[in-house]
Image (spheres, rainbow, N blue to C red):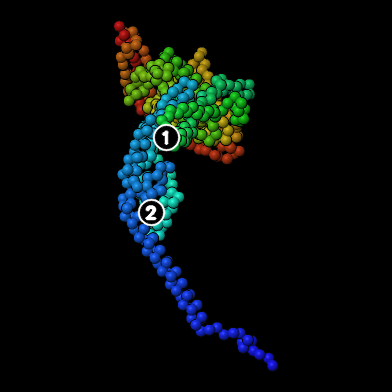
Amino acid sequence: MTIPLRDKLPKLPAVKKTYVTRFARSALWFFLGGIVGLFFFTSFLYIVYKQTHNNLVYDGVMVNGVNFGGKTESQVKSYFTDKNKELQNIVFILKDKDTTASISARQLHFGYDADLLAHQAMSIGRTNDSISNMSLMIQAYTDGVMLPPAYHYEEGRIDALLKPIQEKLTVEPVEGLFNFDNGKVIALQPAVEGQRVNTQKIKQQIKSELWAAAYTKKEQTITILIPITPIKPKVTEDTIGDLGIKELIGQGTSLFQHSIENRVFNVNLAASRLNGSLIPPGKTFSFDQTVGDISSLSGYKQAYVIENGKTVLGDGGGVCQVSTTLFRAALNAGLPIVERNPHAYRVGYYEQDSGPGIDAAVYSPTVDLKFKNDTGHYILVQSAVDQTQNRLTFWLYGTSDNRQANIDQPIVSSETPAPPALYQDDPTLPKGEVKQVDFSADGANVSFHRTVTRDGKVILADTFVSNYRPWQAIYMRGTKE
């Protein structure tokens, strides 16, 4: 006979089963009560802790290693304000072989950001999230909460304080001057390397040293060697052979016979300052910028110039002879003329070996001669003065692209007779001496056309117009006793 399994198990007494159930239930309530009690106890501690730290930084909140627990926001601010007084004494000595300058932290307005640090310290544990606040309070109390220091300074002050140093030590490179001789380019004046202060590197060093000095909490004098960055010239003797200067691409001439001595001097001086200069491919040449200052300070003498409709003595009289000659060279080279201005009246010098209207006036900085180098290679400007014939010549050397320039004869129209002669006093001539400096010229409208072709195709066509006023002969009467 088989007995069922359930019949083999002993049955528990009902009393023991009831005891287990009651124990489990009591344990559960005890556990829940403990949690609720702990919650209320923790909440009580949280509230008491908040009340005891009302308007005080919570314990364990540290800034830059300093524990500000129990301090008010104003006390934290005062602490860093006092520290800033110490930081003001940090001084940087900037040195070069011939230069020494100093910059202080006070001048840079460097220091701890006291307002920000005080606010950050007070904000720990004071957010809108109570759970997060409690967590931060416990963390600060047990392990500490570290806040990094925050600084302020005025970077614009660094730039202003470095500017005099930069101006003193900056040396612009001197571009070499070159000459084309026997089919090759040789140096007339070697290129000279320039230099510039690396202000960005100085600023980085100052910032780095400021943070380090603030961390060490010592009054310091810090020496920084001024970093210098060399500036290479655009063209040197080593690279001149790579510029594609190998043949004549344009030439212009003019005569200046019967010029007074000072005018001849100025023509020579201005021509020499253009001689050997280089025009990079794609760049626009400016006569005014290349020649530079035209005054007695830069070596020019007084000669007659046209100013406000009058012929008067002025620095650099005769420089327009140079711009006119270079204009003719650019025309013959087929280069695009960007800016050209005619003279107010027909000047006899410019018609000694040319038709009227092929001139170019300059008057820095408002009146300029400009043309563009569109040849794809460098252009070398070369000048020479024939002192015997009083002839100025400009040659432009580069690489020919087979362009050909054809310049038509000038067309003269609307001529107007010259007015009567004009006599003006000249304190440089002996009294009683009379010297003619300008010759009468009829007024006229003059134009000429230029066509530039390459391989039979027109690549440039332009017309140059000059509206000349009628001009009288001018005589200078000596008044010098």
Q: Which residue is mark 2?
A: 125
- Tell me the CA gap for discs 1 and 2: 29 Å
Disc 1 marks which amino acid? Lys
Q: Which residue is mark 1?
A: 217
- Asked whether residue 53 is in view, the answer is yes
* Viewer-side residue, 394 vs 380: 380
Q: Would residue 474 be found to the left or right of residue 213 on screen?
A: left
Disc 2 marks which amino acid? Gly
Q: Would residue 381 be found to the left or right of residue 259 on screen?
A: right
Q: Residue furthest right?
A: 1
* Viewer-side residue, 164 vs 44: 44
> x, y (%) of residue 136?
41, 54
> x, y (%) of residue 425?
30, 14
* Viewer-side residue, 384 vs 289: 289
Please name the residue shown 38% across and 39% down the image: 112
Element type at mark 1? loop
Residue 359: quarter of image: top left
Q: Would residue 19 be found to the left or right of residue 429 on screen?
A: right
